[in-house]
Amino acid sequence: MIDSKKMGNFIAGKRKELKMTQQQLAEKLNISFQAISKWENGTTYPNVELLYQLSEALQVTVDEILHGSEKTEEGLSYSKAGVNIAYTDTIKKEMAKHLETGDKRVLNGLGPFASLYDISFPEIKEPVLVLKSEEPGSKQKLAVEYGYTESICHDMVNHLVNDIAVMGARPLAVLDTIVCGNAENDTIQALVKGVSDACQENECSLVGGETSIQPSVVESGLYVLTSSIAGIVEKDKVIDGSRIREGDTVLAIASNGLHTNGYSMVRMLLDQKPELKLDKIDGLTLIEQIMKPHTPYYKALKGLLKTDWIHGMAHITGGGIEGNLCRVIPEGLAAEIDLGQLRVPNIFTYIRNNAHVSDEEMLHTFNCGAGLLLVVDDKDKQAVIGHVSEYYSSYEIGTIKNGEKKVTFSGRVNWI
């Protein structure tokens, strides 16, 4: 229980020790001096958003403010190690509102040791769980640097959902992990909100996770994100490429840019040529272009998963078309991709030209405009294109033939 009188006396005492007036302390916190006066009188106490700033201004820990006394022993404490338990517990309580969901399968909220999720699906005779973990790579460093905190969460969740959707799965629940050197309330709140909103957009639930503060491991101001997802699919509806046959058609679904791959190269380019940051590509700055969230494909695929049209799918991430499509092509078959059909967004041409990247390296590093590939029976391709095109541009890009090398290229990329 917080003793507001004791806390107020402590705040007043530390302020006076530092020879600060109430007005001077108020200016440091960007609030009115009347608020300081109320704290010191014990009529109110600081809200969680101000606690950390107040602790820095008074040169004490958050725990000491909340307890209303300074720790005089020289022994070690979690606070001295850089982790304020009272502050982080308060943050976690505020995070709970982002975990609220209308999904009746979620049986508990924030607080228990683990999350409970009801996986009874009477309509699914042989349910198969589809599990995946992901992190948004070095793009998250740029996200924190340029203020795309919530956006990077959409990258992470969209990438996760795409990875299980290409196996025919319906997304169910996400668990997130945030590792940081110093828990800043506004940033933590933005991250959790971003993950929660992205889950809702992908028709699944954020059911819990972990916030780990590691002051001696992670640099202050740096946040490392990762998430795991569980999806479900009927056993005989799993899409793993085994139904792919000679004569099938390969369709591309457009990406909106880099998605979450190739950012180590992009960061190196920005380090070498920082003046490029404000260059305009299609009306957006370079930073705005490369920070577009990863395209979410689940809603475009959901209706197709009820049909038998799709023989295989590949989410095009690191490794490009060749490195990902090969994962679903059966032995003895080859997907011949016509590079001349690729519809390449201008951001890729810009990177290629300014970083002097070879065509081979571009195709190996980036999706180059094809964010997801579908392998379908040739007779069904127009129906599939028609369905997907209600959401994203989709077009024919290749065919399945007999061959030993699973992915081959013909033609040349048209770098406009």
Image: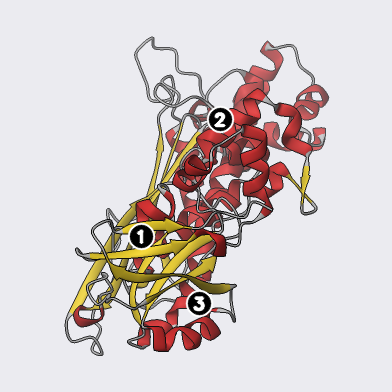
| Residue at numbered disc 3 | 300
Q: Is residue 134 visible?
A: yes
Please tell me in which quadrant of the rendered image residue 168 appears. Answer: bottom left
Local SS, label 3? helix
Residue 258 horizontal/vertical position (percent) = 56, 50
The amino acid pointed to by label 1 is Leu
Residue shown at 27%/70% (left/top)?
241
Q: Secondary structure at mark 2?
A: loop
Distance of mark 1 from mark 3, alpha carbons?
Answer: 19 Å
279 relative to 122, above or below: above
In this rendering, the label closer to the viewer, 2 or 1: 1
- Chain-order first, disc 1 or disc 3: 3
Residue at label 2? 221
- Residue 44 visible here: no
Give the Cα distance between marks 2 and 1.
Answer: 38 Å
Mark 1: which secondary structure?
helix
Asked where in the image residue 14 lies, by quadrant, the reply is top right
**Relative side of 354 to 255, left or right:** right
